[in-house]
Amino acid sequence: MTQERSLPRATLDALGGVPRFLRAPFHRRRHLRWGATDAEVADHMPGDELVPRASFEATRAITIDAPPEAVWPWIVQMGYRRAGFYTYALLDNAGYDSADTVLEEYQHPRVGDWMPMASKVSETTAFRVAAFATDEWLLWSKPDSTWSWTLTALAGGRTRLVTRLKQRYPWESPGTAVFTLVLLELGDFPMMRRMLTGIKERAERLAKGGWTRVP
């Protein structure tokens, strides 16, 4: 995998997003369900039972003009210094651009695989693949947190993509809890909004190219 790195460009991009980060807490009710219907917010998602008393729960959704099999590859390859997260490169991928191509080495997930969020991989800095059904749903988990995805096929070769993040703030470790609170309350929505639109853009381009999954 070769990804371009430009710290000046990535820094300018991140600075351009500062207003969104600062405004996020003032629009919390709206951004916790950005793009999602009432039914999607109320619906069960994979792994909900793993964090029954979440301090932070956000359900977001987007409709993509591409079938699930063209959306799935962009999700399963995400991760720090893998495909990145299709958002602010300085903040999520050490300044390296997120992938614009399907990376075959990450297209065959297995339960227990790491999905790194930072350079140091541990139970607090990375999710693990907890369960999945190819092209249908995916669940990542770590202690006190789950991140789930569902892909529902729609008429016309489209996909309804729904994602839910649940996090319990670990107040038994105050420093960690405060850091997690600030990270999610300020940073989660701007990052997730750009991630979802980034997946949409890539999947629609992939579908137009007539891509077929390699076995």
Image: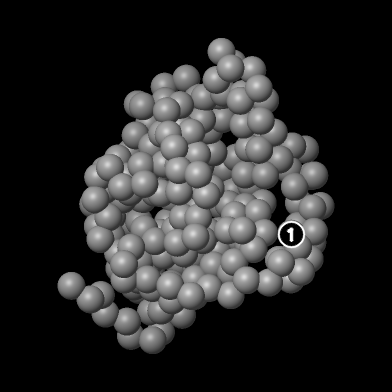
Question: Vertical placement of 168 versus 87: above or below?
Answer: above
Which SS class for mark 1? helix
- The residue carrying pointer 1 sits among few (fewer than 14), some (14 to 19) or many (20 or more) residues within 10 Å by Cα, namely some
Q: Who's the residue at 27% across and 55% down the image?
A: 109
- Which of the 4 quarters of the picture holds residue 212? bottom left
Q: Position of residue 190 (x, y in %)?
A: 67, 51
Q: Residue furthest bottom?
A: 209
Q: Is residue 186 visible?
A: yes
Instruction: Please name the residue that numbered disc 1 is placed on.
Output: 14
Q: Position of residue 168 (x, y in %)?
A: 52, 24
Question: Vertical placement of 99 versus 209: above or below?
Answer: above
Q: Nearer the viewer, residue 201 or 129?
A: 129
Query: As shown in the figure, which amino acid type bears the numbered disc 1?
Result: Ala
Q: Nearer the viewer, residue 112 or 86?
A: 112
Task: Tell me: 165 left or right of 179.
Answer: left
Q: Nearer the viewer, residue 144 or 43?
A: 144
**Quarter of the figure that contains the C terminus:** bottom left
Q: Who's the residue at 66% across and 38% down the image?
A: 183
